[in-house]
Image (cartoon, grey):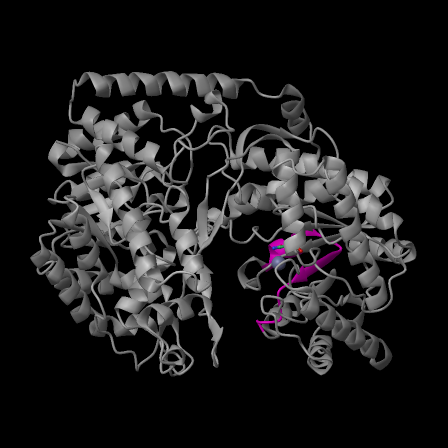
Amino acid sequence: MVASSVLGFPRIGANREVKKAVEAYWAGKISADELTKAAADVKKASWTSLKERGVELIPSGDFTLYDHILDHSAAFNVIPKRYLGHNLSPLDVYFAMGRGRQADGVDVPASEMKKWFDSNYHFVVPEFSEETVFKLNFNKAVEEYNEAKAHGINTRPVVVGPITFLALGKAAKEAKPGFEPISLLHKILPVYKQLLADLKAAGAEWVQVDEPILVLDSAQYYDKQFTLAYSELAPVAPKIMLTTYYGRLDSNLSFVSKLPVAGLHIDLDRASGQLDEVIAAVKPTSIVLSLGLVSGRNIWKTDLEGAIKQGEKAIAALGQDRVVAASSSSLLHTPVTLAAEKVLTAEQKDWLSFALEKAAEISVLASVLSGSQDAKVLEALEANKISIAKRRAFERNSDDAVRKRVASVTPDMFERKSPFSVRKEVQQNHLHLPKFPTTTIGSFPQTKEIRAARAKLTKKEITEAEYEKFIEKEIETVVRFQEQCGLDLLVHGEPERNDMVQYFGERLNGFVFTQNGWVQSYGSRYVRPPIVVSDVSRPSPMTIRWSSFAQSLTNLPMKGMLTGPVTILNWSFPRADISREMQCMQLALALRDEVIDLEKAGIKAVQVDEPALREGLPLRKVDWEPYLNWALPSFKLATAGVSDALQTHSHFCYSDFDDIFPSIQALDADVISIEASKSDMKLLKTFKQYGYSNQIGPGVYDIHSPRVPSEQEIKDRIAAMLEILPDSLLFINPDCGLKTRGWKETEASLANLVAAARWARQTY
Ligand code: GLN
Ligand code: ZN
């Protein structure tokens, strides 16, 4: 028999119960016990609903109140000293590590957070040093296994694997230079042994040990560590399902297939091409192969027929008992259920599958692959066939105008008319910016009032006209503030934007939106990614109204503000039937029209934000070039349709540029702004080393904290920057948008920024 399995489940709860309880706990509105109870209810509901859908291998231990890697750190006693000794409960220490704590005389910043592989989920980075003492503070795997068992549900516990845990961590400040977390493997293994032995004693037959690091190039250096770790763990543990996801094993397969594990899970959604190779490698062993057939990363209904073919291939080689039908990864990247969606049409809902619907697909798959002739199973299979056929029929309805336009794009459309050196002069005569121009990244504080007005509009408690009046007033406040403050290149402040991607999705053809499709970004922060369902085009201008209004208020130049094509795509659920390249080109053409319209409306500078360009980089280096080969041209296509006089800006939120530097150069934006306030001057040195020649605004202060930078600090920073960059290229700006900040610190910080820029003009 082919078993069915889900690797992990969303944590939020069908009605956002966990998010609400966690935030209520932080606000002091509920007790720790009430929080635990709310979490227990959601866990029970998740286990029960997976069981009801026929899933046999149900995960436990994957639930978390904040982040599962953080849970693992807390359990293994990987707790930086700065969080201890404040007389906090273990739960509060845990939250302090995740989000910092500033109350009752305790003031500790949050631990570093990083993107989880190539997803928009963020994990809290564990910190290790020679001093780290691993011990089991609690055994979450056993606790949740027993918790589920008490509800009559037998689960397969999930544990983060030792190599992934260490490899994703970083050296703590107190670690000696050159310290590598992986060097602690021999110290952590005994604790893993204890955890796994306890799990076996508790009755778990299988344990899912997640080692997603195995889909990265870097795992090849850990072959010896993998062999050591799993030879030690396997004898004491329940049967280990070594679990990989988000990519392919490639050459790592050569040592992975020799590990003494009982099972191996592979992702066939992201890497279907690895199936034959993996089958061949595990065939001579007794390893059970878990096939990740149902995507944990997208929200499309699975084509069961296609999945069955893959399953049959594995069965032909290994037999039914050595095959499991599974989700490709944890379902944490998908919303809980479609059931609550009221705005999507029945036709649209029929295309989609969220976590619970995916669970049902997996169990149908497993039944079919086991040879079931059960009427219900066959019915479900038939229904799936019909849905897929309908979706395919819809997909064939492409928008001819859009397709033709993409096909007729010519090479000249990707390039500005003149090189930067020429444009720079034309723009100077057009914009009249002073030396060291000051500007901001776009958004100003999104106040309670702004959010309330938007909510009222949605509930129709105010009219469209009243809302627009309100937004105009907000824009006017922002413009007047910038004038008084003495900024040179103004922005309208983005008060009308609910979100930098959703706002554009809502104004473009080709997108649909969910009401309850929440996906975890980090901690209690969830986003509702738009879904691309068909060809993308722009029915009418999207931002001109607000940018022109803002420009009409002032004689200073106003910068138009757009989200770039790559970022819109990377922060949406893309369609699965056409390439991301094609979708990105369509977005680029829509944005190109907007940029051109902004210029026509008298706007002299336009910023096209691409903070997600870098995070979209594929996990394997060999795949970078194909990605960059469409991502970079998309940005250029969006921005190159204007005259030399229009100054294009772009913004990137990160500072990790070393390996993709030439790509940033290739974008040929007139001005880029980057996060440099945290990365010291290392980043700028990279720019210099490569001879970056366009203008650049390295953030002069960190907006992610309410702290106000002093004038002197900013001066020092500018001085340090000018040691590396030529005077004529430097813009002066904060390192990201101000939407999460309050007005008070924004006013104070920008006043210091302007004063520092004035000082620089006199000094250099
Ligand atoms: N223009 C956006 C803002 O200021 C940019 C945000 C971002 O790149 N994350 O909010
Ligand atoms: Zn940013």
Residue 746 placement: quadrant: bottom right
Residue at 72 percent across and 38 percent down: it is 542
Q: Residue 687: percent from the left, percent from the top?
A: 65, 66
Q: Relative to the observer, which residue lies in front, 276 or 268? A: 268
Q: Residue 403: percent from the left, percent from the top?
A: 63, 24
Q: Relative to the observer, which residue lies in front, 40 or 611? A: 40
Horizontal side of 240 relative to 476 (left or right) equals left
Say whether residue 642 is visible: no
Residue 549 placement: quadrant: top right
Say whether residue 652 is visible: yes
Up/down of 327 relative to 172, above or below: above
Q: Quadrant of the N terminus?
A: top left
Q: Quadrant of the C terminus?
A: bottom right
Q: Residue 347: percent from the left, percent from the top?
A: 47, 20
Horizontal side of 690 relative to 336 (left or right) equals right
Q: Residue 23: percent from the left, percent from the top?
A: 44, 58
Q: Relative to the observer, which residue lies in front, 368 or 659? A: 368
How many labels were placed on the picture? 0
Quadrant of picture, ligand 1: bottom right
Residue at 90 percent across and 60 percent down: it is 432
Up/down of 102 relative to 283, above or below: below
Horizontal side of 257 relative to 123 (left or right) equals left
Residue at 75 percent across and 75 percent down: it is 752
Up/down of 501 relative to 395, above or below: below
Residue at 56 percent across and 47 percent down: it is 628
Query: Does residue 139 belong to the magenta stretch?
Result: no
Q: Which residues are magenta?
A: 661-679
Up/down of 92 relative to 245, above or below: below
Query: Does residue 670 belong to the magenta stretch?
Result: yes
